[in-house]
Image: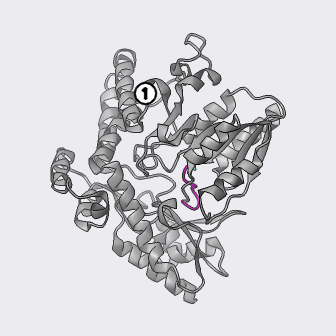
Amino acid sequence: MHTSRRAFLRSATAGAAVPILAPRFLDTLERRLEAYSHASPQAAAADEAFWSEIRAAYPTYAYINLENGFSSPEPTPTFEAFQRHQQAINGGLSFYMRRKKAADDAAVKAQLAQLAGVSPEEIVITRNTTESLGTVIHGIDLAPGDEAVMCNQDYGSMLEQFRQQSKRRGLRCVEIAIPLHPKDDRELVETYARAFTPRTKLLLLSHMINITGQILPVRTIANMAHTQGVSVIVDAAHSFAHLDFRIPELDGDFFGASLHKWLCTPLGAGILHIRKDRIKDVWPLLGDTTRAVDDIRKLERIGTHPSWTTLAIGDAIRFHTMIGAARKEARLRYLQEYWTGRVRGIPKVYLNTPAGTRACGIANVGITGMTPKALADALFDRHNIYTVAIDTVAVKGTRVTPHLYTTTAELDALVKALGEIARG
Ligand SMILES: Cc1ncc(COP(=O)(O)O)c(C=O)c1O
């Protein structure tokens, strides 16, 4: 990497420049977007005028940012609301915590539950997916010799939490491989079914595999698991507010997601959903004997934490709803297909992501004869395009994750860069 770029990256201003917006920016934007209310999600997906309105609300970058998989930037209206909440609470901290917080938290929870299509009595606001699913993985009763099935493309923090249960309680972790390009849902269902034994108690399913973007048919696999008496934990870190769905449609037992990814909240916001009849099966990790065993609030005793983050979830939901979940999914898939469609067929370029509705915004690309790191470095150092190298047993390539603010011109630059790098 060039020294100047290293210095740039080390500097406090690297990355995003946040636009300062007029106070009523969001009201105005909501009104302007009404002009598009009759466009179908598919028509809106390709309408650059619509997305340039949205882009104006996001930070701009000194490089082409195609690594939005770590987390999403907050759109500026959410960022500014977050700062206002912090300022207001700081101006009366104890009073807020004792007199107002409970009602505000309940209101945000109700909004989040509505977005997710579930009852507020089935959700907990957490800090992230790791905490949401850890609450279940560590809170559920397991006996030595019980088995949990997961795959080698699931997220490391989840696999690690299961491995810890293995050391502590004698859980057997069965880590399977799943295909990068499944023929059909049946192939995936059968792959999971083959791993089950009479001792299988839990199945971890990633709704959207983070390193490739593959979307698993969670409902179909979960239905099969339930016929074998296996409980299903859904990792929806990347699918929530990226794909247009409601939690019950997945038919899992336990569900966790990070809101700072595709809902674009400030960092440190997540959701845990537990189906009403399963709440009694999860022990609170931090103790709450005062609540009934089937009261989800037993899991909310997490100590003092930043209330302004919780409040900003409400602002993020307003922004998300303004765009519309269906339009967001359609645009993210459009952007992915825009660039993958143009690199398919370039000699030496291969894709680790299935085509069609088995993927949405995230995809992974490799070049034969190049390590993932060499490819990601070449994209950044030579073409100013930021992606992330993925080098695991199962997947080798660089992950490309556009966002709602990505332009097709930026994707043209990616396509051109991949072609040049592949030619050598
Ligand atoms: C599939 C998946 N699960 C879980 C996580 C963990 O998310 P968090 O760090 O917000 O807990 C990630 C993060 O990228 C992820 O991609």
Q: In which quarter of the image is the N terminus?
A: bottom right
**Mark 1: few/some/many CA within 10 Å (<14, 14-19, 20+):** some
Whole-percent x and y of residue 389? 60, 66
The residue that mark 1 highlights is: 119
Pick the front one: 414 or 336: 336
Can residue 403 be seen here? The reply is no
**Residue 292 painted magenta:** no
Whole-percent x and y of residue 22? 18, 49
Residue in the image at 27% along x and 61% along y: 44
Residue in the image at 59% along x and 25% along y: 278
Total marks shown come to 1
**Residue 207 painted magenta:** yes
Q: Is residue 191 left or right of residue 333?
A: right
The magenta stretch spans which residues?
206-213
Can residue 210 be seen here? The reply is yes
Residue in the image at 63% along x and 35% along y: 134
Image quadrant in which you'd find residue 275: top right
> Which amino acid lies under the numbered mark 1 shown in the image of this protein?
Ser
